[in-house]
Amino acid sequence: MNLASLDWEVLDRLRATFLSDEKTKGPYWHTMTDLACYDITFGERIGWKWDAVLRELALRHWTIPTPATVLDWGCGSGIAGRRVLAALVEQAPQRLLLHDHSTLAMDYAEHHARQSFPQVTIERASHRFLQEGAIDLLVLSHVVNELSETARAELAELTSRAQCIIWVEPGTSEAGHALVHWREKLRATGFHPVAPCTHAAPCGLLRPGNERHWCHYFAAPRPNIYAISEWVKFGQRAGIDLRSLPYSFLVLDRRGGEHAPGVSRILGEPRLYKGYAKIFNCDADGVDELMLQQRADKTLFKSLKRASGPLLYRWTRDGVRINHAEVFPTKTE
């Protein structure tokens, strides 16, 4: 299947399901066509979010345990697991295990992962593994808003046996706040925050007065997406701005490690005005709104207009006023 042969009735139904509460009542995959249509449209957009996260982890020189057993829990079409293997296969993950409440989804995910990565063992997670298996890397994608009380308990038990976790969610306020609470819960069990955090301190978003803010970022779609007529048609039919890919994410590791000192992160996007910019800044001291006047650092101000990649900086500032910034990581780090 390709973008020119999409079943629009399937996509319309899936879109309506994703926007309703019905998705929590059981599998929404009826046929392989459902999964195929999803995988090359909605799933591909999720893949671009995973690409952004995995590029950042490479920038931070983070690596998974090797050899590794990777569990993609709630795999759906398997887009997250495949993106992880594509980025980390050189680090020698030996096995990708798949789990989903839909047998049809596991059929699809298993088939396509085996096609793409014949050098990796691709299997469905057995009941025994889910109960007691050791997990080197737990992969979670777009599951947080669908977790029942039972599923949350199951997931908490899985995290207790995981060495590392990469978790990607939509960039909504609800999902962003949920990941912050999971961060604090898992930090208390021995996990160390790797990303998006620039520190291992308690999350500043949990302090009183920060309730309207949340941790989210924006991934880049494929280049020149508006030059591809099939993607334009999909965006119009689904009511999606193809350029907007907000996401929240969390990467945790039991192996420890230190964050580079003095690094801050911009949450969301810089807000640009005539002659100045405002940013919502996160660092080890908490979260604050900072301001950069254009005349203070014209190069930095211009770069914020076309910001790409993780917005990590070391600020030189007076209170909430930024005077200068060093993009992180530098060439020497």
Image: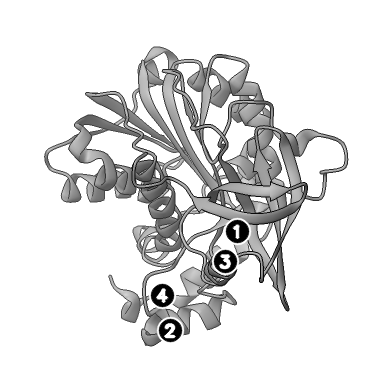
User: Given contact means CB atoms under 8 Å apart, are the residues at marks 2 and 3 in contact?
Assistant: no
Amino acid carrying mark 1 in the image: Phe
Quick one: label 3, few (<14), some, or many (20+) residues within 10 Å? some
What is the CA distance from the residue labelled 3 to the residue labelled 4?
Answer: 40 Å
Q: CA distance from mark 3 to mark 1?
A: 33 Å
> Which residue is more in the foreground, 329 or 201?
329
**Residue topped by disc 2:** 226
- How many residues crowd around disc 2 within 10 Å: few (fewer than 14), some, or many (20 or more)? some
Question: Cα distance, mark 1 to mark 4?
Answer: 17 Å
The amino acid at mark 2 is Tyr
Marks 1 and 4: CB-CB under 8 Å? no
Which of the two residues, 88 or 42, is positioned nearer the viewer here?
88
Residue 291: horizontal and vertical position, in percent? 73, 59
x and y percentages locating residue 169 in the rendered image = 56, 47
User: Does residue 292 sit above or below 298 in this rendering?
Assistant: above
- The residue at 62%/29% (across/down) is 183
Residue drawn 66% across the image and 36% down it: 180
Question: At numbered mark 2, what does the secondary structure look like: helix, strand or loop?
Answer: helix
Residue 314 sits in quarter: top right
- Name the residue that disc number 4 marks: 7
Q: Nearer the viewer, mark 2 or mark 4?
A: 2
Judged left or right of residue 36, residue 9 is: right
